[in-house]
Amino acid sequence: ARSAAMLFSMLRMAQVPPTAQTGLLRFCTREMSRRAGKRSKRAQVDPTRGWLPIREKLEAVPLHLPELLRLKVVFGRTGDGHTAARHFVRQHLAQLRYHNPDAEIIQRNSKVEKQAYVDLQLASNEPLRLDVTGLPHRLDVLRKVLEAAQVSSESLDASISAAAAMNEVTIDPSGYCGDHPAKTHGVLPRVVQSRRAQ
């Protein structure tokens, strides 16, 4: 298939009847303008997309745990005692995976789970189980995990203060996540709205 520009240049040189020429000219100009529009859309770069904003969120809280081999968070999907664990997973699990790429970091949730807990396995110790059921805030879960991982007090304070500066997570039934409308596809939106921690 020949490009529209080639057809346009061939039309000018060829001896084509005027009626056929106008139809082909219209087609060529329409095709060229359509392709030019696509090129201009590709050239625009959206600064809110890409790796930079993702990397900023992942590096916002320093959570490097050199002794960590395995971390597993288990919680229920509903219930008041599981809220802190759910918010901990939503806010900090990706950061833990980013800072500890060699550790196995997983989560499990179910409708029937009665207790929220964190299983930790460090290189120097045997496995630990931290009960996080009923904790009031995700920062309490984070503090418990960092203390069990035997982090120094300076890095513990730095991590907790950086985590406290992050936006809080709340369920937004209107379907908005910050400034972006949710794509619900006919189901109730599971999106979050950010608001500053008090």
Image (cartoon, rainbow, N blue to C red):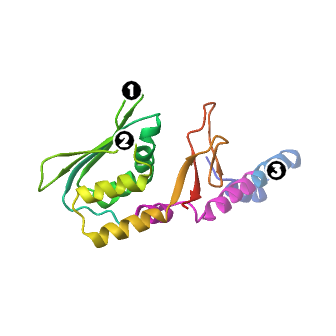
Query: Relative to the observer, which residue lies in front, 187 or 119?
Result: 119
Q: Work out whether residue 194 can be spotted.
A: yes
Magenta residues span 31-59
Question: Image point 36% across, 70% down: which residue?
Answer: 158
Q: Amino acid at mark 1?
A: Val
Q: Is residue 63 left or right of residue 84?
A: left
Per the image, the residue denoted by label 1 is 112
Q: Amino acid at mark 3?
A: Arg
Say if the magenta span includes residue 42: yes
Which of labels 1 and 3 is toward the front? 1
- Image quarter of the C terminus: bottom right
Sequence-first disc among 1 and 3: 3
Residue 100 is marked as none
Residue 133 is marked as 2
* Residues at marks 1 and 3 touching, judged by CB atoms closer than 8 Å: no
Q: Amino acid at mark 2?
A: Thr
Furthest-bottom residue in this view? 154
Distance from Cα at disc 2 to Cα at disc 1: 14 Å
Question: Image point 28% across, 63% down: which residue?
Answer: 64
Percent across and percent down for residue 192 are: 56, 47
Q: Badge 1: how crowded within 10 Å, few (<14), some, or many (20+)?
A: few
Question: Image point 42% across, 39% down: which residue?
Answer: 81
* Residues at marks 3 and 2 touching, judged by CB atoms closer than 8 Å: no
Sequence-first disc among 2 and 1: 1
Say if the magenta span includes residue 91: no
Per the image, the residue denoted by label 3 is 26
